[in-house]
Amino acid sequence: MGYAIAINKAWDNLIQLTTEKNFSVKFLADEYTIDSQKKSVFSLSCNVPAKDFTAILILHYLAQRIKGLPQLTGEWQVFRELAGIEGYYPTFRERAIEPIIRKYGSKPEEILSALKRLPGKKADLADISIIVEAFEGIPVLIKLMRADEEFGPEANILFDRSVAQIFCIEDIIVLAGIVAGSI
């Protein structure tokens, strides 16, 4: 019930944008088929329907892709720089940043192994960083900083400035959380 309103709204928006009924979207290492007649978002690699929060994210991305994705700016932006984030940062940190620190804080170089299963590349920022292609045209930069005598390990997730033209704040939190869980 929690996602019913959001998912119905996402389907209605998609159906208003196009008469096409079937779509395919790559999201991280998976491909999803979207059937607007059956209102289904289906993972091809897992052979199961997408979880509601993933389906909503995919439908929002697909709707924007149909309208036309904005050009990448090449400028990275931290979550706190997004407009309208008041009150959302603790949730973002809990769902996206802290899992990365727990997993890779003591051995940040191990994050490179994520590139064996996810589309992306190594970046030369911070102590170690990668750029994951979450969706086509939606890169996500993950930076890790090693612990030193003064501070513990730290991580951050950055987005191309164009992300705010594609997703709302809640979607960006969900996207970051899924990416963090996938690496």
Image (cartoon, rainbow, N blue to C red):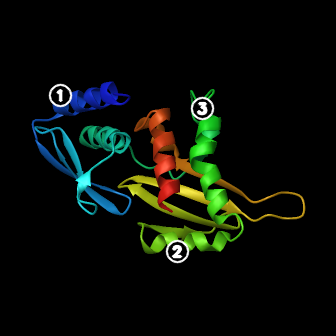
Residue 74 higher or lower than 19, as above or below: below
- What distance separates the C-alpha of mark 2 from that of mark 3? 30 Å
Which quadrant of the figure has residue 31?
A: bottom left
Q: Which mark is residue 80?
A: none
Res. 107 in view = yes
Residue closest to the eye, 174 or 165:
174
Identify the residue position indicated by label 2 in the image.
Answer: 113
Secondary structure beneath dot 2 equals helix
Mark 3 crowd level (few <14, some 14–19, many ≥20, 10 Å Cα): some
| Residue type (three-letter) at the residue carrying disc 2 | Ser
First along the sequence among labels 1 and 2 = 1
Residues at marks 1 and 2 touching, judged by CB atoms closer than 8 Å: no
Which quadrant of the figure has residue 151?
A: bottom right
Mark 1 crowd level (few <14, some 14–19, many ≥20, 10 Å Cα): few
Residue 98 higher or lower than 146, as above or below: above
First along the sequence among labels 3 and 1 = 1
Identify the residue position indicated by label 1 in the image.
Answer: 16
Secondary structure beneath dot 1 equals helix
Residue at position x 60%, y 54% in the image: 99
- What distance separates the C-alpha of mark 3 from that of mark 1? 30 Å
| Residue type (three-letter) at the residue carrying disc 3 | Tyr
Mark 2 crowd level (few <14, some 14–19, many ≥20, 10 Å Cα): few
Q: Position of residue 77 (x, y in %)?
A: 59, 45
Q: Residue furthest right?
A: 149
Identify the residue position indicated by label 3 in the image.
Answer: 88
| Residue type (three-letter) at the residue carrying disc 1 | Gln
Residue 79 higher or lower than 48, as above or below: above
Q: Residue furthest front?
A: 1
Q: Position of residue 64 (x, y in %)?
A: 31, 39
Q: Position of residue 149 (x, y in %)?
A: 90, 64
